[in-house]
Image (tube, helix red, strand yellow):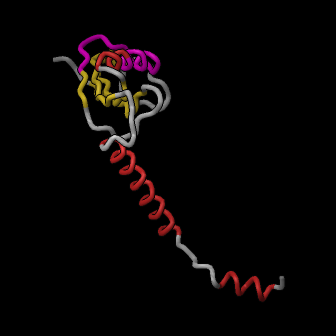
Amino acid sequence: MDNKVVLDQLAGIRKVSLDDLLNSIVVVHLEMEKDWKLKLRYGKLETPYSHFTVLADGIVEELAEGFKCPKGKAWMAMKTWASSTGESADMIKVIGQQIGFTVTGKTEVYETEPTQPPSENPYGYDINFTPYDEE
């Protein structure tokens, strides 16, 4: 193939800007996100788990990499896909211990809308901490 043919073929290819490409990726991601939520809502996606947000009062020690909170008293919050409120409460204790947080007080569990799809196993995500001082 000579250079003229290659140049003619390349001239026919539509050039896409990086912004256009990124916007397309975001749109596809949002459509996929809506898709699993709709499938879950209308029974096309089934899971044995329910979605919860769990809060636990405790003590922040040396946190694992990727987590930030001053040492001391804090609330840990986490979203979970779990089989029950009890399992969700157990998950925050176990995961908290693994990342440097010890539950010492009250644990509250609420059924909430998910922001991530279910998987084959229970899991927690969107972990964050809110420190406080007792006064």
103, above or below 17, in the image: above
Asked if residue 98 is among those painted magenta in the image, a careful observer would answer yes
**Splitting the image into 4 quarters, where does residue 68 fall?**
top left
Asked if residue 80 is among those painted magenta in the image, a careful observer would answer no
Q: Which residues are magenta?
A: 91-108
**Splitting the image into 4 quarters, where does residue 23 fall?**
bottom left
Residue drawn at (25%, 23%) of the image: 109
The N terminus sits in image quarter: bottom right
| Left or right: where 73 falls relative to 44 | left
Residue placed farthest to the right in the image? 1
Q: Position of residue 15 (x, y in %)?
A: 57, 77
Q: Position of residue 39 (x, y in %)?
A: 36, 45
Q: Position of residue 6 (x, y in %)?
A: 75, 82
Residue drawn at (39%, 40%) of the image: 45
Residue drawn at (73%, 85%) of the image: 7
Residue placed farthest to the left in the image? 135
Please state which of residues 72 and 99 is positioned toward the viewer in this rendering: 99
Q: Looking at the image, how many numbered discs can be counted on the residues? A: 0
| Left or right: where 120 falls relative to 52 | right
The C terminus sits in image quarter: top left
**Splitting the image into 4 quarters, where does residue 125 fall?**
top left
Please state which of residues 127 and 63 is positioned toward the viewer in this rendering: 127
Please state which of residues 38 and 79 is positioned toward the viewer in this rendering: 38
130, above or below 101, in the image: below
Please state which of residues 118 and 125 is positioned toward the viewer in this rendering: 118
